[in-house]
Every structure is written in structure tokens, then in C-alpha cells.
Image (cartoon, helix red, strand yellow):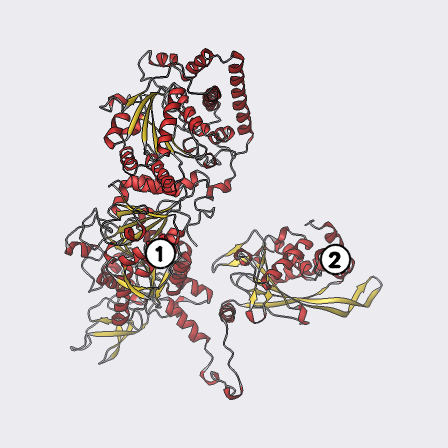
Amino acid sequence: MAELTYRDAVAAGIAQEMARDERVVFLGEDVASAGGVFKATVGLLEKFGPKRVRDCPISEQAIIGAAMGAAMTGLRPIAEIMFSDFLAVCWDMVANEIAKTRYMTNGQIALPLVIRTANGAGSRFGAQHSQAVENWAMAVPGLKVVAPATPADVKGLIAAAVRDPDPVIVFEQKSLYSTKGEVPDGEHVDQLGKAKVLRSGKDCTVVALALMVHRALEAAEILEKEHGIACTVVDLRSLVPLDTQTLLAETAKTGRLVTIEENPRLCGWGAEIASIVADECFWDLDGPVVRITTPHVPLPSADQLEDNTLPSVARIVREIREKID
Amino acid sequence: MKRKKAAAGGEDIGRETRLELYRLQLELRYCEKRAYDLFLQNLVKGTSHLSLGQEAIAAAFGVAMRSDDWTFCTYRGHAHTLARGASMAGVLGELMGRQCGLLGGKGGSMHLTDVSKGAMGSYAIIGAHLPVAAGAAWSAQYRGTEQVAVCFFGDGTTNIGAFHEALNFAAVWKLPVVYVCENNLYMEYTAIHTVTAVDHPAADRAAAYGLESVIVDGNDADEVYRAAVQYMDRARKGGGPALIEAKTYRHSGHSRADPAKYRPEGELEKWLEHDPIKLYRERLAKLGVAEATLKDIETDAMRKVDEATAAAKASPVPALDGIERNVWADGGAAWRN
Amino acid sequence: MPQLGETVAEGTVTRWYKKVGDAVRADEALFDVETDKVSTEIPAPASGVLSEILVVEGATAKVGARLAVISESAQAAQAAAPAQAAAAAIPAERAPEAPPDRRGTAGAAGRLSPVVSRLIAEHGLNPSELRGTGRDGRITREDVLAHVARRAQPPAASRQPPVASLADAEVAPLNSVRKRTAEHMAKAWAAVPHVLQVVEVDFSKVDEARRAAGAPWKAREGFSLTYLPFIAWAVTRALGSHPRLNASFGGDHLVLHRRVNLGIAVDLGLDGLLVPVVKDAAAKSPAELARAIHDLAGRARAGKLKPDDVTECTYTITNNGAYGTLITAPIISPPQVAILSTDAVRKRVVVIATDQGDTIAVRAVGMLAQTFDHRAVDGAYAAAFLNEVKTTIESRDWAQELAGDSEG
């Protein structure tokens, strides 16, 4: 085990896969000589050279389109979209082309590619550089979607995404880049579609993703120590495929479900989770499903405003106390 | 930017190649006409966009391309897909929503694909396939395979962002891709000159991205063939991308729904005089090809279309279990465990 | 909550004398209150109908808090209740930005959560017996489980029988299969009222067919023809005319399955039991059932079952005959509503009634024992089913069935 930052774990994951497989290439804006605007890809150009690590013009459609063309002809590209907000600029490529091509061609075309992108709030960047948009991708059939919360997971899930035969979008939470955590030594490959139970408690099951996992854990600690409410905390990690088995089993154990989402309220991923639980786990529920989300507003920029828009530890504690008997 | 004139003698293109060009143009013409007939019989549903009048371009590239080169085409892609050797029954079957369709009925007219023949898809969102073709070219460049990606699109595409992103990207990475604009004068229902300030919507812009370009008579298969050979060869050898703007004309409307009433009187008639197949037949006759040989090619082409039609009609409709197949590489559609 | 002494801030309601919906006369005893100073009976302040109890027995409320609502009449009670309840239910320390409380009427008589209603139905409880410890007296899942555990405990005197010394014993830890089995069995036994019925069946006709077809069968198929496929065939037939035994119990309803998916319990020694399922068993001939059962049992023992092989069971057969048992009373696997045990078939002397009078004969006889869920059906229905199984086994021309192979 070595302690790595989340950003170094990103580079380590990409490097691990590039070293293993010559077909893996990496492209994006400012990713090569500059090492990425979040410094998450430092050293890759030096290690693998300009043929495999390529700086691109500010052309999101060209970047994703090129990744698609390369993937269907035998490469396994990793494309970076600097901020997940910019996915809107190339959403045709992602949602109309990449997601649908295998299906429309009845399996003739395979697209083993990865799109990595910095997602979510916490950096005071305002409404066009802070959105959590993993739910957009989740809504499109044909895309796999993961959102790791820790350095170990980001490395392992990037590796799993590269090896997966289908297109995978990896949503990296940008305010986690500087966080540290233990990462297994040597080759580390995780599994898509597996949630992790991080903490077990009898009163309530809390399901969270990415940045919100850390807040959920902190809130669970306070709830247990100060209020005697014992929470199970599940890091969903992957939205597609979705680990409904873990979700349903953990919800059934406590009879209560709380989702903590960075997505704005309407159609955030928690809405789908709530629907699945209501449908398949109803007779195990001991109270209504609770969704703690960002309100349905574009994200404001100032410290005070942003902090009070995202679900905070204090808000999570308060809402769980109020809503769980 | 260069302008090409049809070589008067045409000794540079061999007799066999010319006969092949004629055969292919005829097959494309007959097949598109058959598609229209089937539509009138209510056997083809949805929309479809015919290439009637534009066959010379698809045919010329079909003959000029190496079998492992890649074609990327638009929703007006029946001809380009057939020109790579895709099964005609597979194309008509797909239009008719039959199991034998190239895509098993899951794509339809606008997404014809046959990877086994290098037809890497028909893309129905304007401009989307230009970057994709660049990506395929990048893959060829990376692996050193000397394959070339050829990307067809219409004049309307030149005003969408992806066109501009792709041209710059291809030029700056020196990718082996040939962009082919089929300028048929109308973006959809609107004349291209009313929405574009430059005379040659594709070629005039290519220069801005450092892309070599040429304008050819898209109704002259020989002229298109020469440009195709020249620029694919150049790209194959590392000379980078190029753009060919082929001037042509659509005999029918934009799609099934379009009677093309917006065209000025006499325009269609003028272009019918310059029809690629009429022009090519006259040239072959002048070059000494016997009338009987031409007749044989015509008969064979019609028979091929008839056989394909019969095969497509005989094919069953797709099995319903296909609905949840092939979303993922494992063949299924599961999004959960 | 009345002020019972100047220094008293709160009181605990220890008893209500009236239920919601009861008529109340002014000055009639309504409830008991206990404070740290006094324990006293409080009379009703007005006449009317007790339309709502807001503080249940055992709950504590601040002085001045609303404890119950007395309406002028029953009709008025209904109309007034929601508004009053909403007014009474807003907790004091709610955060300013929190949305208004939209929960319906709270309190012991309020709605039950899904899991609580399910558990109450499964354990056959009456909600009014339960004490709610949740907010506003809501009955929680914990409350039901605690109640069930209390009820299940034997009287204190006999609780701890003397245990043999561990000195001359060894502890055998349970593996996870055993633990799961233990959990399932205990849960099923506790939740389902089991009733056992047994019929004695004459297997002579089956024996005839086995004698005639057994050797070629073994040569052709590679395994012996046992009694089980014949019994299974008779069971699928009888389930067709007794659909309420091919069913799932759902608390307030039965789900009658259209398909007969027959589970066959397979013993894996210390690794517990597996119940692979013959899907659509009703469409199979005895020969097809024999093959399917042989295949599933073999794969179960080899650990080669697919997930799909053990799902959607609608009725189970457990076969203990190999060990010579006379009768086994099996435990039902809920939500299924019945299970059949087949025990040893052996030669017996039986009395047979003929036109010439009673006579004694040696016949192959075995017991078929079925336990059924008495919540789902009654004894006569289950017995009629067993009788049909018996009649089929005793009267069918099995040689013909085997010859027809796929004839159903």
C-alpha cells in the first residue's frame, strides 16, 4: 500500500493501462505537456511519448469523435473532457453516436473507450464549471458510468474502464483531486458495477457517490456518537451497471434509505434509486425514502453560497435526524 | 484549391475499371429506384434519403478504395454502403425492416453499416462522422497500416461545428483522411448559397484549416475517380488529409417527405442532361465499348436488384428478442445486477 | 397536558381509558398521568367523540401539549382531524429551511409502514397489541421484532436447561450454508402455521412399470428409474386441479401460479440442502421428469447449477425414502404454501376388498406426507389434493405413460 493523492492515482491508473496495452492512447486538452489543468496526468507524456499522449485543440466534438473512430478501428482510447460541463458541447458524440452505435449496427461496431472528466462542485468555479452531471450520462442507454470517491477506486475503476469492451465515462470529483488515500501496490484493477459497504448500522442505509461519500461517512460518525443513530453507508461507485443487489440488500436490513446526491433535485440518480427501492423493496421499508440533494438551481460561486447549496455534513445530520424515527 | 477538368481522352483509366464504374453506378441507380418503388408499395417505412443523380461519387470511391479502407457516410448512405460491396439484399432488407437487413432492422435507412466491407457506419446527425473518420485515420496512422478513411457529407454539413473541428484536427495531426463534400446545391430544402457566403462551401473553407482541396464534377465518375486515387494515395503515404468538393445534383427531394418544389424551373432538366449515367454510357460508347456489352451490364444490374428485392421480401421480420440485444459487448442490455 | 404542580414541566400518559372513536362524556375518566410529583386520573374536559390520541401510553409530553382531540360528533371528528393533527405535529426545533411536515396523522393509530404491516401479517399480530416507540408513537420494525422475540421466549423457569459440560465435547462451528439454513428454517417454522397430513399409497402399478421398463431404461439413460418421477407427475396433475397449493402466500392474498415449477430438495451432506427447480413440470411426461430430476440433482451435487435453476419454485418435493423413513414432516419454504415428503416404499401385507370378499396381499406401500400452510388453505382442500395424488399413482397405466414418453 502506498499513499497517493486522487490526482496521482488518476495518472497511475492511466499509466498502468498504457504500459500494459499498446492500444491504449490518451488525448485531451492540455493533458500532455501541461499535465492536465488539474495536474492529474502529469508525467504521462514523458513516460509514453507524444504519439500516445496527445494534446488536442479546444474541440470537444473532435476529441470525442476521434476517440470513437479510433476505438472502432482497434485502439482503446482514453479521452479527457476537462470539465464535465463541457460534455454538453459534445453531447451528440457521447449520447447519439457512442452510446447508440453498437446497438444500431446490431453489434457490428465495438467502442472500447473511456471518457474521463472532472465533475462536481466545491471549487467555487460557478455554474458552468461545477455541475455534477453523472445523471445525464446515466439516462442514456449504452453508456457505463462510474464516479469513484477514493484514490484506490479512481485507479482501479479507470483500469477496469479501459479494459471494459464498452464505452465508460469516469466522473472524477474535482475537489477530491488533492485528497489522499491508500492505493494497493502493483497492478490494481477494480470491477465496474460493484457498490461498497463502508460502514454498517442498524437504523438507516445511506447511499452516496463521489464527494458525498465522504460527507456521508462524516455524518454517520456524528449521528452514531451524538444521536445514537447507526447508519450503513454505501458508496455506489457505479451508476451503470448499477449494483442493485447491494442496494436492495442493505436497504432491507435497515428498512430506511437515504440518498445523498450532488445532482440538482430533479432526476438526480437518487430518484432512480428511490424508484427501484420503492418497487422492489417496499415491504422491507420502515419509512419513506429520503433524498438529500442540491436544490434545483444552477450552482452559485461564492464560498458561502456554494457551501450552502451542496448537501453539507451538518445538513445530512439534520435531515437524517428529522426524518428517521 | 484546384479545379479539375475531365480528361478528354481518359486513357489513364483502364477499360476494366471503366466497365466496373459503369456497372456500379447502374446498380446504385437501380437499387435507389427500387427503394423508391418499395416505398410506394408501403414496404419501406420511415424516411430515406436517395442518391439518385449522385451515383458517380460513391461509385468512383467504391472502385478506387482499398478493401481495408474505411467509408464513413451520412444518412444519405445507401449508395456509399453498396459501393463498398455490402449485400444489396441486406440494404433493401434493412430499409424494409427485415431480419436479413444489414442491421437486423435495428438501424434503418439512415445507419447502414457493414464493417466487414469497411463501411463503418452512416451517421444521421449532420457532421458527427467527420471527427469519427479523423479518429479512424488516427488509428491507421498510429498503427502504421496505410489505411485511409473516406468521409462523405453534403454541402449543408459545412455550416455545422463538427465540420470545422474535424478539418482542423485532421490537418494539425496530418491524418490519412479524405473528406468528400457532395455539393448538390441544397442543404435540405434550402439552397446552400442562401445560407453560405462563399461560393464553394467546403473547398473555400478547407484552405483556412491548411487542408488541400479540389473541386470536381461530381457527375463525372472518371474525374471523381482520379481525385480519389490521387488524394487517397497521398494520404496513405503520410501526405495528410484532403478535401474534395464534388458538384452534383439530387434528382429527387431531400427525403421521402420532400417533393422539391423549391427548385427553380428548368434546373432539374438541365442537370438531367448532365446525368452521370447518361454521360458515362456515352463516353464508354465513344471509347469503343460495344452496345451489347453495355446492355449486358444493364441487364445484369437489374437482375441483381430484382434478386435482392426478392430475397429481402422473403426474409422474416426481425425476432423480438433483438430489442434487448447488443446494447453491450456481452450481447445484452442489462444495466443492473 | 395539565399543569400538575407549579414545578412540574412534563408528564407521562400511563393509561388511556378510551379508544379513538369512543364517545366521551365531560368529567368521565379519560387518562392517567404520572409526573415526578404525582400520579393521577384526569377527567375529560368536554363531551364528544375521542377523534384522535396524539400522545400514546408511555409517552411523555410537555405541560400545555395537546394530548388528544375530542370532537363534537363523529362527522366533525373526521373533518377536523387532519387540520388539527397537522397543527399539533410540528416539532419545536425544526430547522428554518426544512419543508413543512407532510406526514399524515401520526400516533399509534396512524399508518403502518410497509415492513411493519408485512411483519404484523406474517406473525399474525394485532397492531393494537404493539407499543410504538417511533416518533409520535409510530410502530417501527424494531417494535414488531422485539414483540415477536418476547412472545417467542419460553417462561423464565424453563429458559436455561442444564447444558452438558463442554469439557467432553467439541464445538463444531456452523458454515455459512448451515447458518443460512438455520435462519431460514427457524423463520419459516415461526412464521407459518404448519399442518401435516399423510396418505398411504399402493405403488404396485408403478412397480409393474419399473419392472417392465427398468432394465432398458437404465441401459438407455444410464441411471435407474425411481419412484420419484411418477410421484412428481402425479403431483403436477393434482396441482392443476388444486391451484391454491401451487401458490405464494402474500399476507392478504394468494398468488396462484400458472406454471408448475417443481422444486426437488437435494441433500449435499454438511453443505446443506439445495432445491433445484424443474421448470414447467406440468408439461413433462414421467420420463422427461425423470431426466430433468436426474440432471438437476447431478448438477446440484457437482456444484454446477445455474442461478436460474434454483429460482421460481412453486411447490417442493423432498425425498427421504432412501433412508427407510416411514413419515417425514417437512418445513415449508415460504412463500410457497406446501411441501411433500416421499418416504420409503416397502412390501406390506394389505387387506384388499374384492367382490369375493376381503383378501390379504403383499403390496409395495409408501407414505406421502404433505405439510401445508393453514393460512393459505384448509385441511379438506389439502387432503383432496393428496387423495388425487394417491389415486393417480395407484390407478394410472404407467407402462403406457412411459411408452408414450412425452405424452402428458
Determine if residue C81 is in view.
no
Choose between A195 and B301: the one closer to the eye.
Answer: B301
Relative height, residue B185 to residue B317 (above, below)? above
Q: Amino acid at mark 1?
A: Gln
Residue holding disc 1: A16
- What is the chain identity of the residue bearing mark 2? C
**Position of residue A303 in the picture relative to residue B334 (left or right):** left
Relative height, residue C53 to residue B138 (above, below)? below
Q: Residue at x 37, y 70 (%)?
A: C143
Q: How many marks?
A: 2
Circle 2 packing at 10 Å, graded few (<14), some (14-19), many (20+), is: few
Relative height, residue B127 to residue A131 (above, below)? above
SS label for mark 1? helix
Q: Position of residue C180 (x, y in %)?
A: 49, 69
Quarter of the view holding residue B277: top left
Residue holding disc 2: C219
Can you tell which mark lies on residue C191? none
Q: Amino acid at mark 2?
A: Ala
Q: Judge if badges 2 and 1 mark residues of a common chain.
A: no
Quarter of the view holding residue A156: bottom left
